[in-house]
Amino acid sequence: MYSKKKRSWVKHLDFTIIDIACMLLALFIAYLWRFEWSFDSDIPVDVDLYIRMAIALVLIDIFTIFFTESYSGILRRNKYQELRSTVIHCFIVFGVYLIYMYATKQSVLYSRQLLFTYFILSVIFEYFARVLWKRLIRRQKLLDKNKAEMLVVAEASTVERCLEEIAHNKFTDFKVTGVVVVDVEMKDQTIQGIPVVANADDFLEYVRTHVVDEVYIDGNTRASSEALANTLVELGVTVHISLVHTNFMMPNMVLENYASYVVLTTSMHIASTRQLFLKRAMDIIGSIVGLIITFIAFIVFAPIIKATSPGPIFYKSVRIGKNGRRFKFYKFRSMYVDADKRKQELMEKNEMDGNMFKMENDPRITPVGHVMRKYSIDELPQFFNVLKGDMSLVGTRPPTEDEYEMYKYHHKARLAFRPGLTGMWQISGRSDITDFEEVVKYDTEYIANWSLGLDIKILFKTVAVVLSGKGSK
């Protein structure tokens, strides 16, 4: 899944909030300077007049940002360019308010000293706040460990140019972690400090077994760019194709600029920033509520788990998350401590056709574990994974490491989304489904058709399924 880059004024909501805060602070200090600190204490003050002024300035500021794109290229501006931009922005906001003030015949009610003190202070505060915030953003981008990991696919004749344009910009939302040269054997070499990780023959295998979020394909790479892009999308990878000599159609397309390249971006699903923000907000709120329930369950079940089976209360394992990322996964322990070792002995009784293990009356499950599993109580600690951001409330269930190693190419598509506590296939039969290909089908269908409404629908159905205890093993 790919998060479409923000292209509206909402992209710089942080600068909007900072500017408004500075503007209100400037007005507040100007007000104190003019009236509270004045030697003439007999001046009557209409406080409501200046409260209305503050509200009007906020509204004018928002409209100014919306229509003038005040923050376009703000991270690339130097200090002198930023000073010029700040003065222009503050002048427009102040000028519009002066026009409003004179048009409504309220100018005689205001202190001239306060108005011009406010204007000067707003320029000073906004300028220094912008400069400091940009410095923090740039530093954070340099240290950001959550950037999308990208591979560049190119021919030997164009790879140097591609990397010069794409790989060395420090303030992008992605980082180039490898190069694939398709027409010359250069594996294990480095180009401009970036390793050549694969060739044309083992490229797809590398994608299957490593963390790869996005792939950039140079348009001159090969005649079969369309087939390669479609294959990568089936693996759940987001693909960017240089639009040189491309004349084909693919689903979920969006034109974007990567450095000086215009690329056609395609993915299984392209979500807006607003959608992903609301999904994450729903995850945080839901996980906080879930952790309260988890604490109550801990008080009830922790002593029983200890009494019925010696060992830890929580079960921890490494699971595979979005696009192959590994994370520590938490559950209430519902099995005996040697369960992982005994799994190989029971593989011949596996009722799942494919890369999952399910078994009726699994002997590794403790007596209380059967109760916890029936009502999914053992899953409650995963709300901590949701709060951390490793998982979401709704997504695709994360596989174990040994299951992941057996994945075929198209299986990795189910990892294109952040894993979830529940998902499409859980409400469609849970453990009653015995074919892993059907699980993949449900998961890829969920990713391709994802919406907030679908998440809410799945959550409500999950509650009904869990309370009934249907399909659990």
Image (cartoon, rainbow, N blue to C red):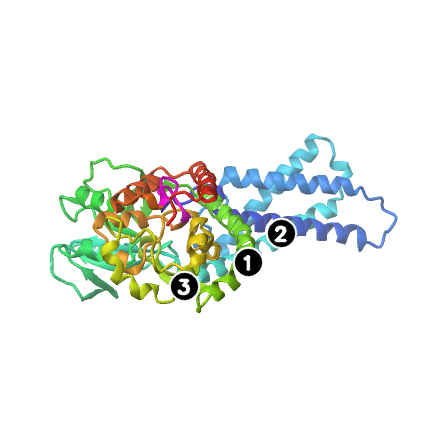
Amino acid on which disc 1 is placed: Val
Q: From the viewer's perspective, is residue 472 above or below residue 315?
A: above
Residue placed under numbered mark 1 in the picture: 300
Viewer-proximal residue among 281 and 22:
281
Q: At x 25% / y 37%, what residue is drawn?
A: 250
> Which badge, 1 or 3, is on the more N-terminal residue?
1
Q: Is residue 427 magenta?
A: yes
Q: Nearer the viewer, mark 2 or mark 1?
A: 1
Instruction: State yes or no: discs 2 and 1 in contact (Cβ < 8 Å).
Output: no
Q: From which residue to which does the magenta span run? A: 421-430
- Measured in 3D between alpha carbons, the distance from the residue under mark 2 to the one under mark 3, in whole angstroms, is 47 Å
Give residue 426's quadrant in the image: top left
- Measured in 3D between alpha carbons, the distance from the residue under mark 1 to the one under mark 3, in whole angstroms, is 20 Å
- Measured in 3D between alpha carbons, the distance from the residue under mark 2 to the one under mark 1, in whole angstroms, is 51 Å
Q: Residues within 10 Å of mark 2 (few under 14, many from 20)?
A: many
Q: At x 11% / y 55%, what residue is drawn?
A: 183
Viewer-proximal residue among 323 and 107:
323
Residue placed under numbered mark 3 in the picture: 316
Query: Which element type, helix, strand or loop, lies under badge 2?
Result: helix
x and y percent of residue 56 in the render?
Answer: 66, 38
Residue placed under numbered mark 2 in the picture: 22
Amino acid on which disc 3 is placed: Lys
Amino acid on which disc 2 is placed: Cys
